[in-house]
Image (spheres, rainbow, N blue to C red):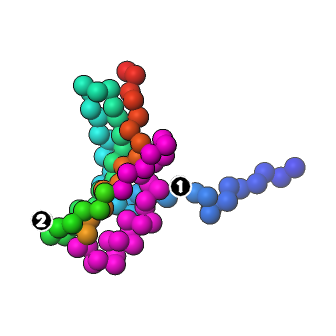
């Protein structure tokens, strides 16, 4: 049987196509840890749309929305997306 190559349509996609920053945010006093994705607005006092995903899913669910919002507003709106906060047991 010949070996099949992976389907390139299912290859991982870099977050840099959708967000300017990807940060790991920890709150040690509460034993919480979360991955946060952010693209700031181009103006200091600009609007930031906050997208929070629950049910233990990633804020990356909002990647395409974040890219569209940034493009449609020409950078005047920023996007902050975070997933469900995971309790850290370490």
Q: Quadrant of residue 19?
A: bottom left
Q: Which residue is mark 2?
A: 44
Which region of the structure is painted magenta? 51-76
44 left or right, relative to 36: left
Q: Residue at x 68, y 55 (%)?
A: 6
> Can residue 17 be seen in this snapshot?
no
Answer with the quarter of the image where residue 71 lies: bottom left
Picture layout, residue 29 above or below residue 83:
above
Q: What numbered label is drawn on residue 12? A: 1
Tag 1 or tag 2, which sits nearer the N-term?
1
Q: Residue at x 35, y 35 (%)?
A: 33
Residue 4 shows in the view: yes
Report the front residue among 37 and 48. Answer: 48
Percent x, y for residue 90?
37, 21
Label 1 Cα neighbours within 10 Å, binned few <14 / some 14-19 / many ≥20:
few
Q: Is residue 71 magenta?
A: yes
Tell me, for residue 20, which label it has, or none.
none
């Amino acid at each position: 049987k010949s070996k099949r190559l992976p389907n390139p349509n299912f290859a991982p996609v870099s977050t840099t196509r959708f967000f300017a920053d990807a940060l790991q945010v920890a709150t040690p006093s509460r034993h919480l840890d979360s991955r946060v994705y952010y693209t700031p607005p181009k103006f200091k006092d600009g609007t930031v749309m906050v997208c929070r995903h629950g049910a233990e899913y990633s804020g990356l669910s909002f990647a395409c929305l974040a890219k569209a919002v940034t493009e449609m507003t020409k950078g005047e709106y920023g996007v902050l997306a975070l997933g469900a906060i995971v309790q850290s047991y370490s």
